[in-house]
Image (cartoon, rainbow, N blue to C red):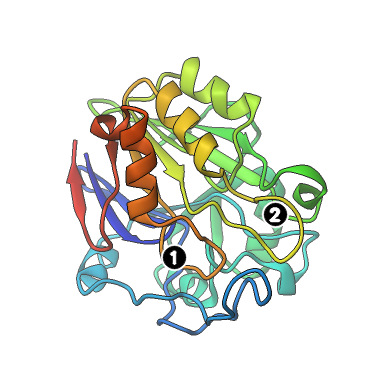
Amino acid sequence: MKIHHLRSATFVIESGTNFILIDPMLCDKGKLPPFSVIRYKARMNPLVPLPDNAPEILSNVTHCLITHSQAFGIRAFQHTDHLDFAGEAFLRKNTIPVACRKQDADYLRKYHLHVETALDYWRPKKFLSGEITAVPARHGHGWISYLMANGAGFFLRIPDEPTLYISGDTVYTEDVDRALTELKPDIAVMASGSARLDAGKPILMPVDELVTFARQAPGKVIANHLEALNHCPTTRTQLKEALEENGLLSKTVIPDDGETLVF
């Protein structure tokens, strides 16, 4: 298995002839509005461009997983850092089969995406030659989680490959802990930017929860969702320092944009 990290939460899993795109934010740098204008500097998103090798990697994509996309079915509330309009256009143009949580399926079909697999939480379905399980992802602590596009993480079991858990946009919950301790993924991808909006508590795991996630993970950890969005304050350096202080850096990979990891 290869993991091609592109930017933020967007990456591609390569397994044999299958290339599985995760959460496509494919627009150019600075094409999306700021996600915070008070708490953090109001910079246009994404803060960085796609890496130079992105077109070559994307040309191979055969499937797509979308962890979350919408809140209340309202277009203006779409989480464009996980599915932007460029990502939609790419999926439509290439008729890429999509897997998502059941609650997002009709919304995505409304915009002519080819939803092939709609998932209920904790109920495995066939995927490729293996199976996929959706794990609840709570997008925030406190009241703000009710306004966010709560979504899913995904656990992938593909023959002759390491098992893989993608956290999606979540804070640390009993479901996340269950995915790590019961499913025992060989690789766990954790969304690590500690995002916050201008109101409310963090909508992604703060650093102490990232440390807990890395500690609970039974295998290798990949940290993504870093240094690409203006509401994500945690940097690669800060995360590295926290993991090192807790003796967890050796099990964690923090890839650069465009980097390919081989497992």
The residue sitting at 58% across, 56% down in the picture is: 195
Q: Where residue 69 sits: x, y (%)?
A: 63, 59
Crowd band around label 2 with a 10 angstrom C-alpha radius: few (<14), some (14–19), many (20+): many
Mark 1 is on which residue type?
Thr
Mark 2 is on which residue type?
Ala
Using the image, determine if residue 159 lies above or below residue 118.
Answer: above
Residue 128 visible, this orientation: no
Q: Where residue 133 sits: x, y (%)?
A: 52, 31
Q: Where residue 26 sits: x, y (%)?
A: 42, 72
Task: Name the side, left or right, on which 136 lies relative to 28.
Answer: right
Task: Name the side, left or right, on which 67 lies relative to 146.
Answer: left
For the residues carrying marks 2 and 1, which lies nearer the camera in this image?
2
| Quarter of the view holding residue 127 | top left
Question: Which is more N-terminal, label 1 or label 2?
Answer: 1
| Outermost residue, left side | 262
Mark 2: secondary structure: loop
Of 155 and 99, which appears nearest the observer? Answer: 155
| Outermost residue, front side | 245
| Quarter of the view holding residue 52 | bottom left
The residue sitting at 62% across, 71% down in the picture is: 35
**Image mark for residue 149:** 2
The residue sitting at 57% across, 35% down in the picture is: 134
Q: Where residue 177 sits: x, y (%)?
A: 55, 23
> What is the quadrant of the C terminus in the image?
top left
Using the image, determine if residue 244 lies above or below residue 257.
Answer: above
**Residue identified by numbered label 1:** 95
